[in-house]
Amino acid sequence: MIVLLFLSCFLVSNRQNDALISSFTTIHEPIYRAYSLSSDPDALHKLLAGRFLGEALTREYIEHSLALQRLTEQETSIDIATVRYRSVEVISHWKGQARLAADWTVEGTITHRGHSHTRTNRYAAVYTVTETADGLRIIDTRLKNLERLSGRLSTGERGGLTPLQLLEEP
């Protein structure tokens, strides 16, 4: 009887985790639409406010605003083709909040200096999310790894590169 109770709790927990992971990827993937907004600050804020909350929203807005400004100055554009999640797992959860570890790749086309090329980057981060009346929102991001892949899912440069440095020529 105790085993059945344990298994039923485990199955409910797995279903809750699956739903949380699904909600997370649903709000996370569209963040990359920011690169198609050029320099429209209202559209950028609206996009990010549907994904982040509080200080996390402020940080992301500033980071994306500066990145879009720099891209415009350098006459560079980014067209995101795919966002693929290698893994997303719930690390912990408590009172309407959870911590998730995510590992994903982003592939896109960068056009600058008169030519275009495909770039694939891999990221790993830990996110803290909270449930709000408007749905799940990210309240903290801890980037753990960021690397440019030389081709699909091979090893590449590692370390403290910024998102804009990943766009630069190797």
Image (tube, helix red, strand yellow):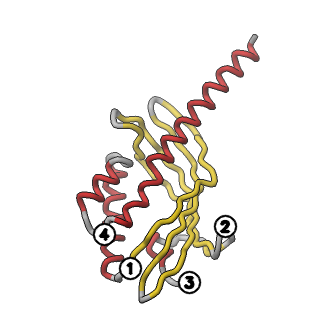
Q: Nearer the viewer, residue 58 or 88?
A: 88
The CA span between labels 3 and 2 is 17 Å
Residue 38's tag is: 4
Amino acid type of the residue that numbered disc 4 sits on in the rendered structure: Ser
Residue 149 lies in what quarter of the image? bottom right
Q: Position of residue 147 (x, y in %)?
A: 58, 69
Residue corresponding to mark 1 = 76
Q: Is residue 113 left or right of residue 149?
A: left
The CA span between labels 2 and 1 is 24 Å
Residue 153's tag is: 2
Secondary element at tag 4: loop
Image height of 121 relative to 54, above or below: below
Residue corresponding to mark 3 = 170
Circle 3 or circle 4, nearest the eye:
4
Circle 1 or circle 3, nearest the eye:
1
Residue shown at the point (34%, 82%) measured from the top left:
75
Q: Residue furthest bottom?
A: 114
First in sequence: mark 4 or mark 2? 4
